[in-house]
Image (spheres, rainbow, N blue to C red):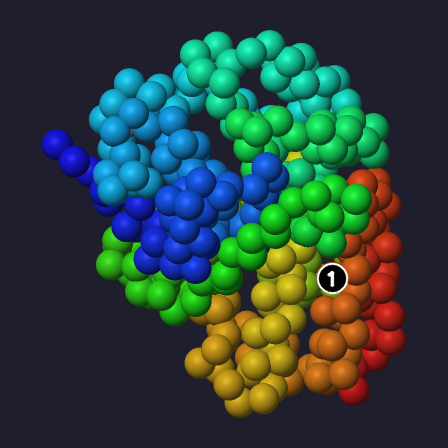
Amino acid sequence: MIDVSMWETLEEMQPNVLKMLKNSIQKGRLAHAYLFEGMRGTGKKEISLLLSKSLFCTNPIEGYIPCETCHNCKRINSGNHPDIHVVEPDGASIKKHQIQSLQEEFSKTGVESKRKVYTIVHADRMTVNAANSLLKFLEEPTAETTAILLTEQAQQILPTILSRCQIVTFKHLSPDHLIQKLIEKGVSEKKAPIIAQLTNNLDEGLLLSNDEWFAQAQSIVVKLYEVLRKNPLEALVALQENWFLHFKEKEQIDQGLDLVLLILKDLLYIQLGKQNQAVYLDESSRLEQFALQTSGQRLAHQMTAVLDAKRKLHANMNPQLLMEQLVLELQEGSTFV
Ligand SMILES: [Zn+2]
């Protein structure tokens, strides 16, 4: 049985990327290193896997579409191909020893062929030492090695690494498209818009829609906003009693900050009379009340503060300190105009 559905699905998502890869494979002109950059859920990891299969498949359709049924395709799908390596952050970062063991692996000749592919997920999270090790590796490419670096934050990658990669930009998918798909899959019309703001990926969206943690996260964030409007002390208490118990890992805090940002955006939309663009539909009546008590200028200032906190989070600032600073920042000038 021939299954081209994976290629077709991903082609629908990222037509330009797949067209470029198809041309490169057909002409035998693959780069030694690619940097796939784009938002979460835009298909970077899936397409890196697809490219690996295209290169190793023993029976590719039209020379480039992996057959999905041969021994190699199956092993790649189950993460068991000896010549394909995936490096992911070990905790918060990708460390030097991870890149070194990759290099050791690659200094052996290919277990089954000479060709080897490695993928580095969240390449922006490499420590400086890890990045420098990788750089040496990229400087000495061998003909049959392909590196694929994935990132949501290309601006955080060393320029020396960027300059050795072919940069492939993954386009942002339209939230409307995803909202439609989520609703088709049974997600309620009230929940779908907020989910579509946080991910670009249908499967991830479906997971979020059933995730109790995520449901609680939304109400904690609304509560935090509510108490922010009262006094600084109470907000700091709320941080300790609710926020820190719920948002523990860096990715969770990041998502919490995204939710704060969405509330502020909603308030702005409501003030501008664009209620139809708001996404916090479960809370719309409360947010309409809040919107009456703040100003556009203040909301803009608060959004800047949240974006700044996200940036600090990725620069590994202590989350406790970061959130306390943010709360104080959000409250600055809290006599409402
Ligand atoms: Zn195959």
Q: Specify whether residue 274 is in view.
A: yes
Q: Is residue 91 left or right of residue 231?
A: left
Please identify the quarter of the rendering in which residue 210 is found.
Answer: top left
Task: From the top left corner, tell me how far across and down residue 294 is, in percent.
Answer: 71, 81
Residue plotted at (43% across, 12% down)? 112
Assign the C terminus to one quadrant of the image.
bottom right
Q: Nearer the viewer, residue 324 or 169?
A: 169
At label 1, the amino acid type is Leu
Which residue is painted at 38% across and 48% down in the image? 22
Q: Is residue 47 left or right of residue 307?
A: left
Identify the residue at the far bottom of this view.
Answer: 273
Q: Taking 333 as reference, is 85 left or right?
A: left
Would residue 246 be seen by someone viewing this image from the given angle? no
Q: Nearer the viewer, residue 254 or 172?
A: 172
Q: Is residue 110 left or right of residue 61?
A: right
Placement of 46 over or under 229, stated as above or below: above
Residue 270, horizontal then vertical, whole percent: 56, 83
Where, by quadrant of the figure, is residue 145 drawn?
top right
